[in-house]
Image (cartoon, rainbow, N blue to C red):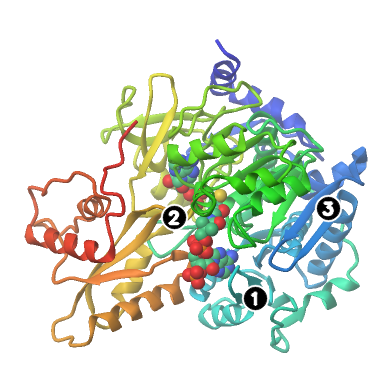
């Protein structure tokens, strides 16, 4: 048996022994009594009885161990022209001061703090400061609209919100503060304070009695020490798209998270303490939480916080410039970023202008990596390019090529093999395991390994109904795919109405809720359509109420503006069509699957249960007018 197969088998046969050993990579204030507490299934708890502090493990511990002068965080911001480095010692002192600032505002262990910030060092420092005092952070991505922020405020009920006056996109300044003000008008929960980091590109007006200036609060704050917390205490809540307009509050604990993430740096990414690791993502997403902030720091690596884009800041060589300037060894990004680079620099000429001698491996996740993009990156960068598959819920890779255990051959189009800790099962609708090469629902047999969500925020029932009810004893990933005879996983599609736009997870159901609220709309459907750059983009179809007699172009423009206003620019909802009827079965179910097949140029058959076959022709004409399918050839299964 190879080293990978052995590690995987052992992790399933003896999870307590396997993760109990991994726990030695973390500093504990008090040892845990059992690695895995399975006394209350389907709820499992890792390292119950253990006491630790995540910030201590990510920052202070490295100073104590002699890494104080090593750079911990590099902030590289082509949009402002700033590069700033923090050593572990400087990071500790900054984090302790901000933790003290939060304390001075009354934030205590267990209180929630929403962080609504762009990619500035204060975002990372704020997360670690919350961890330091046992407060629970919830970071909200800047590309969401005020209403999305309001939903999260009402669910998390933060005592304090930390924000900034603006974010900087390549082409525009995004004023965050008006979005925050609007969100707090919509929300029913009232935070006691909002602390605003002013940025010179757009200073914000402060609301007297509620808003405070970051500098004023933090300047004289008394540094706060690390507060020991239970391994099972929540470290953060991260909201992610569900199948409705209400996002799910994924909870992460302290102990399992620290153990799994540190372990993953060594065994999946094969990176050593002291090396530079860069995840080109955003702190608002799970990749940012796990691999910009926590995992690299827990492992004593230098992490890079990049406030820029793969293209346009200033060109398609930006990623390679960052890798060269900071001596990055291992990098992580989304395939869509590579497609954007490839579109502008197909020959990879800009790669040659940089010294990439320390660059060892590129990891990709967030969406399926098409073999063309993988091949292009391998060819131009001349390093292994590893696709790996995970979700906000799991916090780290379910499937990967664990380079620190055993480098397996790369199969382009596959997300690799199940990582240790994950008992991945492909099931048919009756819950029976499927043989190799047959597509089914991808599930993980319980218990989930450490670092995975223990529950949803104050919603145990929602945790069960969303993930555990469909197949008792298994966690439903929401993805469909198959395992090949060599044990590699091929992640092909979602089984729900979640789509993946430029590596961002979005709910078409949430977009339909917005369209349905337009006064002229009787019925609507939103589908994800294959897009060369972004992987998928949403396209809407609406049927108007009888008697509506307004130009369709005006209505479509209003629908586009509504989705941008209520969900945010990140939804990239730019196209919609008015049709006379939606394709439906005789029982009234909208045939979204067939609509998507038409949009993607796949082979499709008229469903036998269809109510009116001409409705599909109309959808086909509407899609053609919008320029779909982009590539008429069906996506071949390898
Ligand atoms: N704050 C405010 N607005 C944001 C934002 C943020 N943090 N992030 C994105 N937006 C806006 C963009 O400005 C854009 O607005 P526009 O409609 O006015 O142009 C919109 O949201 C859509 O953004 P995006 O999907 O990112 O498209 P893009 O055309 O700006 O860039 C890529 C395309 C491929 C370069 C970009 O999507 C990218 O870098 N993707 C990588 C994704 C990633 O890292 N995912 C994390 C998982 S690993
Ligand atoms: P998120 O929770 O935003 O990280 O999105 C998770 C979803 O993105 C998964 O359930 C998949 O649908 C998709 N995804 C992430 N990584 C991959 C990958 N490597 N291959 C295929 N799909 C992926």
Q: Is mark 1 within 8 Å of ligand 1?
A: no
Q: Nearer the viewer, residue 478 or 381?
A: 381
- The label on residue 226 is 3
Q: Are marks 1 and 2 in contact (CB under 8 Å)?
A: no
In the rendered image, residue 467, in percent from the top left (x then y), is placed at: 42, 45
Rate crowding at label 2 as few (under 14), some (14 to 19) or many (20 or more) other CA atoms within 10 Å: many
Label 2 lies in ligand 1 vicinity (Cβ under 8 Å): yes
Q: Is residue 104 above or below residue 617?
A: below
Q: Decide if residue 356 is on the left or right side of residue 379.
A: right
Q: Which is more foreground, mark 2 or mark 3?
A: 2
The residue lying toward the viewer, choosing from 514 and 133, is 514
Tell which circle, 2 or 3, labels the residue nearer the N-terminal end. 3
Nearer to me, 13 or 371: 371
Q: Is residue 341 above or below residue 2?
A: below
Can you tell which of label 1 and label 2 is closer to the viewer? 2
Sequence-wise, which precedes: disc 3 or disc 1?
Answer: 1
Q: Is mark 3 within 8 Å of ligand 2?
A: no
Please give the name of the residue rendered at 32% of the width and 34% of the height, measured from the top-left corner.
Answer: 637
Label 2, label 3: how many angstroms apart (C-alpha)?
Answer: 42 Å
Classify 567 as above or below 437.
Answer: below
Residue at left 70%, top 41%?
258
- Say which quadrant the C terminus sits in: top left
Residue 94 placement: quadrant: bottom right
Residue 582: x, y in percent?
16, 64
Q: Distance from label 3 to label 1 (Cα)?
A: 24 Å
Quadrant of residue 396 in the image?
top right
> What x and y, as percent, mark residue 615?
11, 62
Q: Image quadrant of residue 617? A: bottom left
Residue corresponding to mark 1: 191
Q: Secondary structure at mark 1?
A: loop
Residue that mark 2 sits on: 534
Q: Where does residue 8 sit, x and y in percent of width and height? A: 55, 22
């Amino acid at each position: 048996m190879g080293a990978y197969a052995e590690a995987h088998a052992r992790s399933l046969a003896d999870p307590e022994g396997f993760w109990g050993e991994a726990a030695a990579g973390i500093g504990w204030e008090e040892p845990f009594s059992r690695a895995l507490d399975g006394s209350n299934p389907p709820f499992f708890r890792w390292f119950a009885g253990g006491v630790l502090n995540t910030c201590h493990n990510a920052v202070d511990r490295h100073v104590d161990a002699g890494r104080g002068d090593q750079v911990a965080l590099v902030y590289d911001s082509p949009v402002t022209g700033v590069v700033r480095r923090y050593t572990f010692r400087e990071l500790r002192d900054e984090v302790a001061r901000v933790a003290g600032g939060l304390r001075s505002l009354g934030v205590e262990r267990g209180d929630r703090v929403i962080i609504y910030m762009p990619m500035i060092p204060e975002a990372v420092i704020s997360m670690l400061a919350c961890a330091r005092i046992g407060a629970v952070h919830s970071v909200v991505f800047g590309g969401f609209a005020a209403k999305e922020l309001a939903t999260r405020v009402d669910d998390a009920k933060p005592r304090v919100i930390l924000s900034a006056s603006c974010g900087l996109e390549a082409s525009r300044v995004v004023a965050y503060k008006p979005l925050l003000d609007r969100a707090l008008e919509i929300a029913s929960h009232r935070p006691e304070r909002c602390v605003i980091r002013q940025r010179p590109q757009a200073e914000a007006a402060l609301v007297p009695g509620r808003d405070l200036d970051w500098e004023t609060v933090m300047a004289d704050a008394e540094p706060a020490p690390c507060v020991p917390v239970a391994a099972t205490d929540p470290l953060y809540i991260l909201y992610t798209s569900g199948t409705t307009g209400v996002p799910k509050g994924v909870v992460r604990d302290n102990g399992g998270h620290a153990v799994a993430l540190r372990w993953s740096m060594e065994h999946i990414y094969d990176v050593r303490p002291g090396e530079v690791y860069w995840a080109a993502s955003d702190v608002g997403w799970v990749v940012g939480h796990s691999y910009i902030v926590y995992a690299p720091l827990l492992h004593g690596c230098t992490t890079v916080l990049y406030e820029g884009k793969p293209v346009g800041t200033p060109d398609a060589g930006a990623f390679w410039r960052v890798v060269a300037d900071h001596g990055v060894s291992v990098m992580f990004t989304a395939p869509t970023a590579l497609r954007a680079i490839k579109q502008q620099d197909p020959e990879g000429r800009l790669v040659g202008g940089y010294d990439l001698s320390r660059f060892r491996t590129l990891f990709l996740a967030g969406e399926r990596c098409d073999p063309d993009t993988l091949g292009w990156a391998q060819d131009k960068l001349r390093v292994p390019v590893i696709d790996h598959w995970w979700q906000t819920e799991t916090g780290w890779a379910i499937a990967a090529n664990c380079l620190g255990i055993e480098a397996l051959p790369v199969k382009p189009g596959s997300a690799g093999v199940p990582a240790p800790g994950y008992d991945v099962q492909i099931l048919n609708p009756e819950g029976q395991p499927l043989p190799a090469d047959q597509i089914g629902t991808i599930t993980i047999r319980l218990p989930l390994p450490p670092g995975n969500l223990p529950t949803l925020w104050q919603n145990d029932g929602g945790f069960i109904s969303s993930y555990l009810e469909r197949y008792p004893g298994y966690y439903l990933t929401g993805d469909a795919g198959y395992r090949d005879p060599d044990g590699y996983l091929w992640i092909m599609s979602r089984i729900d109405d979640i789509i993946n736009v430029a590596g961002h997870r979005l709910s078409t159901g949430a977009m339909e809720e917005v369209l349905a609220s337009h006064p002229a709309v009787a019925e609507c459907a939103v589908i994800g359509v294959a897009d060369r750059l972004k992987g998928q983009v949403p396209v809407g179809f609406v049927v108007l109420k009888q008697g509506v007699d307004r130009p369709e172009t005006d209505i479509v423009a209003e629908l586009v503006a509504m989705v941008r206003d209520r969900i945010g620019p990140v939804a990239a909802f730019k196209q919609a069509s008015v049709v006379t009827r939606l394709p439906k079965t005789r029982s009234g179910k909208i045939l979204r699957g067939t609509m998507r097949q038409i949009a993607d140029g796949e082979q499709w058959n008229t469903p036998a249960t269809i109510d009116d076959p001409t409705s599909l022709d109309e959808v086909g004409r509407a899609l053609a007018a919008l320029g779909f399918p982009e590539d008429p050839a069906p996506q071949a299964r390898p």
